[in-house]
Amino acid sequence: MIDSTKFMESFLQKRRFKIILPHIIGKTLLDFGGNKGELKQFVKQDYTVCNMDWTVMLGHRYDTIVSLAVIEHIPYNEVFNLFDIFNLHLKKGGRLIITTPCKLAHPILDFMSRIGLTDRANILEHKHYWNKDELYKLAEHSKLKIISYKKFQFGLNQLVIFEKEG
């Protein structure tokens, strides 16, 4: 979990929220890796947060799943399994919205964490920095369609919106 009491962590988290909010659809929302549920105050959907206890997903399907600044903390091969699980829990026509830093961000995030601007432990947990081609490979594997890909935060972060065809 990130230390959202650190100014820069909180700032970056709110920037991620602002960029994803227009893309959330439907009545049900799963915030996967959503920390303490900080996103809840900004959405109108029936909101569920899921961190370590995946059982909250059992028996449920969601219109939108968001996973913000999460997949870089998971070993590369395990992310493919996670996306298969997301696909199972998305309704037809549902969206999966992720953000993940670009490879270019790695030295910058490392420096910011060394001088105390961001949570050092959080940055050290990063297992893989994804690139655009890898994200498209992930979509293909998971049978999800990327409907939008863009970089933000000066090209250091990526927003990807996947859709389950229905």
Image (cartoon, rainbow, N blue to C red):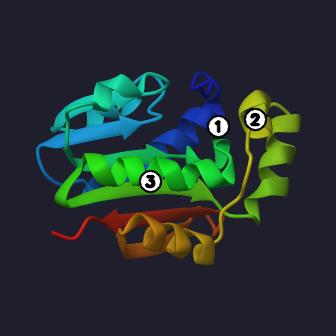
Task: Tell me if label 2 and label 1 are in contact, CB under 8 Å.
Answer: yes
Which labelled disc corresponds to residue 83?
3
Which labelled disc corresponds to residue 117?
2
- Of labels 3 and 2, the one closer to you: 3
Task: Tell me if label 3 and label 2 are in contact, CB under 8 Å.
Answer: no
- Looking at the image, residue 25 sits to the left or right of residue 13; the answer is left
Distance from Cα at disc 2 to Cα at disc 1: 6 Å
Q: Amino acid at mark 2?
A: Leu
Q: Residue 17, can we see it? A: no
Q: Nearer the viewer, residue 111 or 47?
A: 47
Residue 12 in picture, x, y percent from top left? 56, 44
- Looking at the image, residue 117 sits to the left or right of residue 51; the answer is right
Circle 2 — which element? loop
Circle 3 — which element? helix
- Residue placed under numbered mark 1 in the picture: 8
Q: Quadrant of the N terminus?
A: top right
